[in-house]
C-alpha cells in the first residue's frame, strides 16, 4: 500500500473509531466546521458541486449557488458524521431518525412475493435508510459497493454496511447481477444507488436539460425477474430526522426491444430522481462530473457531438 492510501485508510478508520464516541452536539459542530473549511478552500469537489447545482437551479445567482454549495457541504458532512456514528446507534435511535412516505410501494411488493428494486440517487444518507429498513422493518436486503482503493478501505465499508444489516456485493467482477437477480426471484429486496454510471454500459437520459448516463442495472433486473422498480428520494429537514419518499413503481413497457424498454425505464427513474433533487438540491451529494458535456468538452449540451 502506498503512503497516500495508508493515510486515506487511517483517516476513515479514525472516523469510525473516534467520531462515534463523541457527544452528538460535538460531532455536529465538528461536521459543520469541516464542511465550512472545505467550502472556503473552494477545492475541485466544491467547485464541481456548485457547477452541478447550477444545472439543477439554472436561474440561481452566484450568491445563491454559493449558499447552496455551503449547505451542500454541510449536508455531505452530516452524512459522514452520521455514518461514522451509525454502528453505535441503538435500534430506537435508528427508528426515530428516518420517516419515509408511501412505504407501501415496497412492502406491498414484498408481501405479494415479488422482489423489489429500490433505486436511489446520492441524496442525504442512504446508509441510514438502509439501516432503518434492516432494523425497523427487519427486512434483509442486498446492495452493491464500488471497489475502493486501497482494498483495506473497501473492506472497511463492506464491514460497516454488513454491520448495519446489508448484504454487500462488489460492483466489479461480473457476478453481482446474477446474485441480485437470484435475490429478487426469491422475493427479496435490492437497494441500489443509481444516479451515476460506473461502467461503459450506462443508459443515456435527459437530466436537468442535458444528457447524463445512468446505470442500466435497475431496469434490467426488473425486466429479468419481474421485480418492482421503486425510485426513492431522501432529504434532511431542520431536525435530526431524515425524510424519504417512495415513488410509484416504474412499469416495464409492454412493447419494444430490451434496450428500448431499458431506456424508457431508466429515463423514468431519472425523472423521479430529478423531482427529489430539485426539491432538495443541497442534499444531493454529487461532487463528481455527471453530464456527458462535462465529461467530454467536445460534446454540446443536449448530447450532440
Image (spheres, rainbow, N blue to C red):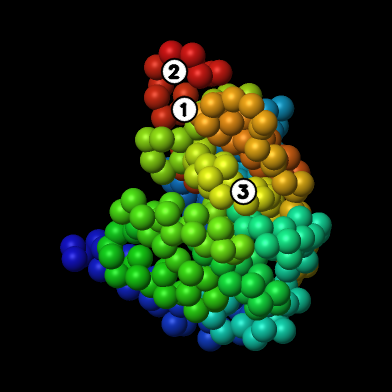
The residue that disc 1 covers is 292
Quarter holding the C terminus is top left
Q: Are marks 1 and 2 in contact (CB under 8 Å)?
A: yes
Residue beneath the point at 67% across and 31% down = 254
Quadrant in which residue 77 is drawn: bottom right
Q: CA distance from mark 1 to mark 2?
A: 7 Å
Which numbered tag is attached to residue 216?
A: none
Q: CA distance from mark 3 to mark 1?
A: 31 Å
Residue beneath the point at 44% across and 82% down = 17
The residue that disc 2 covers is 299
Residue 98, given in percent of the width and then of the height, sits at: 73, 68
Between disc 2 and disc 3, whose residue precedes? 3
In this picture, is 58 found above or below 288? above
Residue 140, given in percent of the width and then of the height, sits at: 58, 72
Tell me: 149 left or right of 241: left
The crowding category of the residue bearing disc 2, from other C-alpha atoms within 10 Å (few below 14, some 14 to 19, many at least 20), is: some
Residue that sits furthest to the left in the current view: 2
Residue 279, given in percent of the width and then of the height, sits at: 75, 44
Report whether residue 62 is seen. Answer: no
Between disc 1 and disc 2, whose residue precedes? 1
Amino acid at each position: 500500500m502506498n503512503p497516500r492510501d495508508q493515510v486515506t485508510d487511517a483517516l476513515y478508520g479514525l472516523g469510525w473509531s473516534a467520531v462515534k464516541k463523541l457527544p452528538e452536539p460535538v460531532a455536529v459542530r465538528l461536521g459543520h466546521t469541516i464542511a465550512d473549511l472545505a467550502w472556503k478552500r473552494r477545492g475541485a469537489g466544491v467547485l464541481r458541486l456548485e457547477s452541478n447545482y447550477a444545472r439543477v437551479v439554472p436561474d440561481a445567482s452566484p450568491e445563491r449557488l454559493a449558499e447552496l454549495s455551503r449547505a451542500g457541504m454541510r449536508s455531505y458532512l452530516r452524512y459522514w458524521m452520521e455514518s461514522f456514528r451509525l454502528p453505535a446507534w441503538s435500534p430506537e435511535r435508528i427508528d426515530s431518525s428516518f420517516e419515509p412516505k408511501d412505504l407501501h410501494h415496497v412492502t406491498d411488493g414484498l408481501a405479494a412475493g415479488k422482489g423489489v428494486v429500490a433505486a436511489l440517487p446520492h441524496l442525504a444518507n442512504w446508509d441510514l435508510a438502509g439501516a432503518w429498513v434492516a432494523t425497523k422493518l427487519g427486512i434483509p436486503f442486498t446492495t452493491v459497493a464500488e471497489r475502493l482503493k486501497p482494498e483495506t478501505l473497501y473492506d472497511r465499508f463492506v464491514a460497516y454496511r454488513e454491520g448495519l444489516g446489508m448484504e454487500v456485493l462488489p460492483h466489479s467482477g461480473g457476478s453481482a447481477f446474477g446474485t441480485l437477480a437470484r435475490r429478487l426471484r426469491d422475493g427479496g429486496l435490492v437497494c441500489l444507488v443509481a444516479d451515476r454510471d460506473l461502467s461503459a454500459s450506462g443508459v443515456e437520459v435527459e437530466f436537468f436539460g442535458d444528457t447524463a448516463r445512468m446505470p442500466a442495472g435497475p431496469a434490467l433486473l426488473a425486466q429479468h425477474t419481474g421485480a418492482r422498480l421503486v425510485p426513492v428520494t431522501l432529504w434532511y429537514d431542520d431536525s435530526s430526522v431524515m425524510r424519504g419518499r417512495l415513488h410509484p413503481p416504474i412499469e416495464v413497457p409492454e412493447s419494444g426491444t430490451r434496450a428500448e424498454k431499458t431506456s424508457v425505464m431508466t429515463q423514468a427513474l431519472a425523472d423521479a430522481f430529478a423531482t427529489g433533487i430539485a426539491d432538495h438540491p443541497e442534499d444531493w451529494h454529487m461532487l463528481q462530473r455527471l453530464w456527458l458535456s462535462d465529461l467530454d468538452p467536445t460534446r454540446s449540451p443536449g448530447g450532440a457531438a
